[in-house]
Image: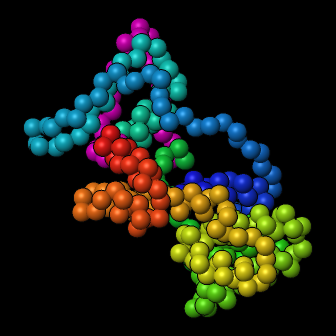
Amino acid sequence: MANDYDKILKENIAALLLPLTEKYLNIKIKDSRELKDKLQTTIEKEPDFIRIVKSDTEEEFILHIEFQSQDEEGMIYRMQEYYGLLRRKHQLPIKQFVIYLGKQASKMPTRLTPDEVFTGFTLKSLRDYSYENLLNSQIPEEIILAILSDFNKQKSTEVIRRILEKLKEIGAEEITLRKFIRQLAVLARLRNLTKETQKQIQDMGLTYNITEDYLFQEGQKSREKAMIIKMLKDKTLSVEKIAEIAEVTVDYVKQVEKELKK
């Protein structure tokens, strides 16, 4: 389900970039250009030598050794990449060594400059921002994020109603309005406000029906399947009874049962 939220944010980021960075990240952008490169999650060349070792002082760590015959200027970045991947996977201290085999003296940098060292990141939570600030926007992509913000002790139904009213107020075309209502309904799941959102949509006479939404239906199927798996694992009910409780066909329960056995 996380992919649903990612898809919405990636779809809206172009419109969100300036208000998001200026209002919430305190960065004023003069110009920008998109990097379309996809970051690789695998490395074609495997590390030369990696072992989890324990020293005579009982210190356990990953020993990483690279043998390098050429004086590679960018070696420091390759070692940095190995370090990040190894640390993420094994969560152990890492000691790295490059054993140089070349004839000439090596000039490879062995230390990152201060601005190249990853020391952490800045965490921002939408729950820390008032929904009023987001509702003051004229950008629909920003307005719908109010569902994830601080309601300031205001009732959720009231906040949702105001979000929908603001979306109507900015005068988007019907097809565009439906798009943002759909996105709002998806984001509402992150706050367990699906039912409240659907009720407000209906009460305001808007045409979008969350139960007909593809993403909502997929979510329902996932929850339905999880319930069937739980009952199958309990082994106290027959396939027929499970199908009756889950309101699905017996064949579907048998299909899930078959997948579970694999």
Q: Is residue 35 magenta?
A: no
Q: Is residue 114 left or right of residue 126?
A: left
- Of residues 153 and 229, which is closer to you in this image? 229
The answer to which quarter of the image holds residue 165 is: bottom right
Q: How is the image coloured?
A: rainbow
Q: Is residue 241 left or right of residue 29?
A: left
Q: Is residue 257 above or below residue 95?
A: below
- Report the residue at 83% width, 73% height from top: 138
Which span of residues is magenta-colored?
88-114
Q: Give the residue at the far top of this rendering.
A: 103
Q: Is residue 18 above or below residue 260?
A: below
Residue 239 placement (x, y as % from top left): 34, 56
Q: Is residue 47 left or right of residue 222?
A: left
Q: Is residue 147 above or below residue 211?
A: below
The answer to which quarter of the image holds residue 205 is: bottom right
- Of residues 79 and 160, which is closer to you in this image? 160
Tally of numbered discs = 0
Q: Residue 204: in sight, yes or no? A: yes
Q: Is residue 93 magenta?
A: yes
Q: Residue 137: in sight, yes or no? A: no
- Report the residue at 50% width, 36% height from top: 41
- Report the residue at 42% width, 41% height from top: 84
Residue 29 placement (x, y as % from top left): 77, 58
Q: Quadrant of the C terminus?
A: top left
- Report the residue at 37% width, 44% height from top: 259
Q: Give the residue at the far left of this rendering.
A: 56
Residue 69 placement (x, y as % from top left): 42, 12
- Of residues 188 and 132, which is closer to you in this image? 188
Residue 252 placement (x, y as % from top left): 45, 51
